[in-house]
Structures are given as structure tokens and as C-alpha cells.
Amino acid sequence: MNPIVGWALAVVAVALGYAKWGWPGVLLALSLVVFWLLLQFSRAMRAMREASQAPVGHIDSAVMLHAKLRTGMRLLEILPLTRSLGKKLSDDPESFVWTDTSGARVTVILKNGRCTEWRLERPDEPGTGELPPSA
């Protein structure tokens, strides 16, 4: 959800709570907003905890990750797919790489916190684990 829309909904909930029930309505609306924020924080922490259990930049299958990626995904949505933190390649543009046991790797490029492009690179020969030189 767009943060602007989320905060606009929070303001509407507080205003509606005040209009309907006065200050108790405002407290109810604020309680709901805080509960929603705690749910989002808990979701982020769970994704990070699960990702921290695996080696950095390692995934089971690069091909499966490549098939599941979509434009517009946030890193928080990508982490459950990979079950590991990506190895950071650069800050501008923000890019991460995950490698599987066969040597295939997926590079994900994020702009404004969203996935804009990704590419799958496979090793030259199956089983060698060596990637072709980049041009």
C-alpha cells in the first residue's frame, strides 16, 4: 500500500471516530492505527528473522526465484521467496544477488525500494559453478 494512502486512511479513521463518538472514537481510531503499525513491524521482523537463518546470498533454486519475481515487488516481499538476505552489490542503483548451489545467480535491482529489473545468469557448463565473464 502506498504510504500516503495509508496515512490518509488513518486520518480519516481518526476524523470519523471523532465525528461519531467524540474523544473515545479518536482513541479507538488511534488504537487501530497503532495495531496496524505493530502488525507491519511484526511482519518485517519475521521476514528478517527467517532470512537471517540462512547464509547470505544463497538460495535453493535461482530459476525458481527468477520465475517468481515481479516488477514492483518490495525487498520485504522478495525475502520470503529467497529465505536469505541477498549479497549487496551496489547502492546506486540498489542491487542484490542470490546464488544457488549450481552457480546460477539472480541479480535484483531496486529503485525507490521496488524491484525494477532482475536477471538470471547461469554458469557456462552445468556443474562447473563458474559464471561466464560479464561484458
Image (cartoon, grey):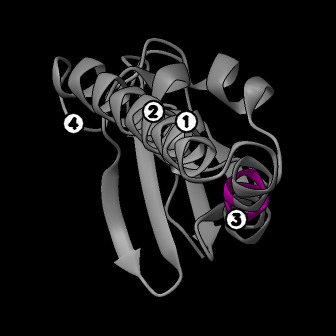
Q: Going from the N terminus, do you reach mark 4 or mark 3 first? A: 3
Mark in the foreground, 3 or 2: 3
- Amino acid type of disc 1? Leu
Residue 105 visible somewhere in the drawing = no
- Amino acid type of disc 2? Phe
Q: Which quarter of the rendering shows the C terminus? A: bottom right
Residue shown at 43% from the left, 18% from the top: 102
Residue 56: give its label: 4
Residue 11: give its label: 3
| Residue 92 in the image: above or below residue 19 | below
- Amino acid type of disc 3? Val
Decide: marks 4, 2 in contact (CB < 8 A)? no
Mark in the foreground, 4 or 2: 2
Q: Name the residue beneath numbered marker 2.
A: 35
Residue 32: give its label: 1
Decide: marks 4, 3 in contact (CB < 8 A)? no
* Residue found at the very far front of the displayed protein: 22
| Distance (Cα) linking label 3 and label 1 | 12 Å
Residue shown at 75% from the left, 62% from the top: 15
Range drawn in magenta: 9-14
Mark in the foreground, 4 or 3: 3
